[in-house]
Every structure is written in structure tokens, then in C-alpha cells.
Image (tube, helix red, strand yellow):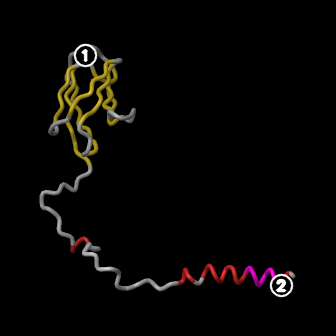
Amino acid sequence: MKKLNVIVAFLFVAVLALPSCKKMDKNPDESGISKRMDEMTVDPTFNWGTSRVVEFSLTTATRGVVYINQTESQDWFHKGLISSGEVYVVSVTIPSNVNEVKLSLNGTVAVVPITGNKVSYQFN
């Protein structure tokens, strides 16, 4: 009976292994999709960048810790100490698809749109 179990197990493994040992087709379907970068045709105005640098100029009448966050989450791009009466200038790299950020300082929160590469904001 033990030999029969070994033979059945061997046949089971062989049945599973044989179909997986197919040779790959060397000439796949010609769908017109380029497989190599040098064969691709890309619009010359296409932006390959995934991030951009935005300069923030922030002012406040009180001293505190300022956060520059994503609007959808608590993940922050920048955290820094801002002094009262001074302009806090910082360049921050953010994902290129982000069009607005959340600025937080001492409990004050503002959602600010990003147009271009400079953002100015004054906390009250």
C-alpha cells in the first residue's frame, strides 16, 4: 500500500509539473506596443518629473511650529520653527500631482492652493 501511495503522489506531481514546462513563444503577439524605450514615440511636451520644488514664504505674529501637510492625510512635507514678525522661507519638494497643501501653526489650519512654484501665506 505504501508503494501505491508513492506512485500516486509521483503521478500527481508529474501531472502538475508537465503543463508548467511550456516553452515561451519567441514572437509574442504584435500589438503595436513598443517594448523598448528607444522605440517609443513620446509627446515632446510630456513632463517626466514626479516631483517639483515649491518655495513657501510664511509670516505670523506668533512664534510656533509650522507644518506643511498633504490635505488628505497627516503626512507632512515640512516641519519648521517660525519666529514672529519674520518671513519664513523654505523650499519643499512635493509630488507633482499635489495642487494644494494644508498649513498648520498653533492650531490654525489653512488649505492653500499651489499655482506655480511659489506660495505666500500670512497666519493671523
Callout 2 amino acid: Lys
Check disc 1 and report its element: helix, strand or loop.
Answer: loop
Quarter assignment of residue 111 = top left
Quarter assignment of residue 27 = bottom left
| Residue, disc 2 | 3
Residue 116 left/right relative to 76: left
| Residue, disc 1 | 84
Callout 1 amino acid: Ser
Q: Residues within 10 Å of mark 1 (few under 14, many from 20)?
A: few
Q: Position of residue 2 (x, y in %)?
A: 85, 81
Is the residue 121 above or below the residue 32 in the image? Answer: above
x 21%, y 16%: residue: 85
Between 31 and 118, the one lying in front of the other is 31
Between 101 and 12, the one lying in front of the other is 12
Quarter assignment of residue 61 = top left
Q: Quadrant location of the C terminus?
A: top left
- Ranked by sequence position, the earlier of labels 1 and 2 is 2
Question: Viewer-nearest of labels 1 and 2?
Answer: 2
x 82%, y 84%: residue: 4
Q: Give the magenta part as a residue range.
A: 4-9
Would you say residue 79 sits in the magenta stretch? no
Between 97 and 83, the one lying in front of the other is 97
Residue 72 left/right relative to 100: right
What's the CA distance linking mark 1 and mark 2? 86 Å
